[in-house]
Amino acid sequence: MDSLAKVIEFPRQPTPETEARSEPDRAEPPLMREAVGRVLRHRRHAQRRTLRDVADEAAMSTQYLSEVERGRKEVSSELLVTISEALGMRMVDLSRLVHTEFQRSAGSSYDANLLAA
């Protein structure tokens, strides 16, 4: 039930038990689509390329690529491969960079949570 409530984001009242378990200084990791988008945008900017240039090479609309970069769209693995290739990356490169983005955003607690999953 807790996982369903978290997905639906029901407001919760803190209890003494949950307050004792919470870690207020720990940053929440970004959503996957946000981390992927940041990596793609950073890579595109590093190459000094426009949205239009990369979108044309990936055979998608500029608007869609922009929404992917802003973390607003969930993107299929097939489209991720296409965008990655348009940026001169392999999926393994994108995965590594997204992992690094998670570490940067969440701090050292991310590795411990990843291993526990």
Image (cartoon, rainbow, N blue to C red):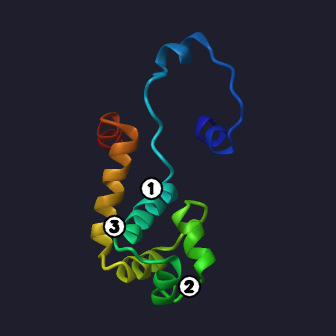
Q: Residue 7 placed where, x, y %?
A: 63, 45
Separation of disc 1 and disc 3 at Cα?
10 Å
Looking at the rendered structure, which numbered label has been put on residue 94? 3
How many numbered marks are there? 3
Q: Quadrant of residue 45?
A: bottom left
The first of marks 1 and 3 along the sequence is 1
Q: Residue 92 placed where, x, y %?
A: 28, 69
Separation of disc 2 and disc 3 at Cα?
19 Å
Q: In the structure shown, which secondary structural element does the residue marked by tag 2 occupy? A: loop
Q: Residue at the spot x=33%, y=54% of the render?
A: 99
Tell which of 36 and 3 is nearer to you: 36
Q: Residue at the spot x=52%, y=89% of the render?
A: 59
Name the amino acid type tagged 2.
Answer: Met
Check disc 2 and report the residue beneath it.
60
Check disc 1 and report the residue beneath it.
35
The first of marks 1 and 2 along the sequence is 1
Q: Residue 93 placed where, x, y %?
A: 28, 68
Q: Residue at the spot x=40%, y=43% of the render?
A: 105
Q: Residue 82 placed where, x, y %?
A: 42, 82
Q: Residues within 10 Å of mark 2 (few under 14, many from 20)?
A: some
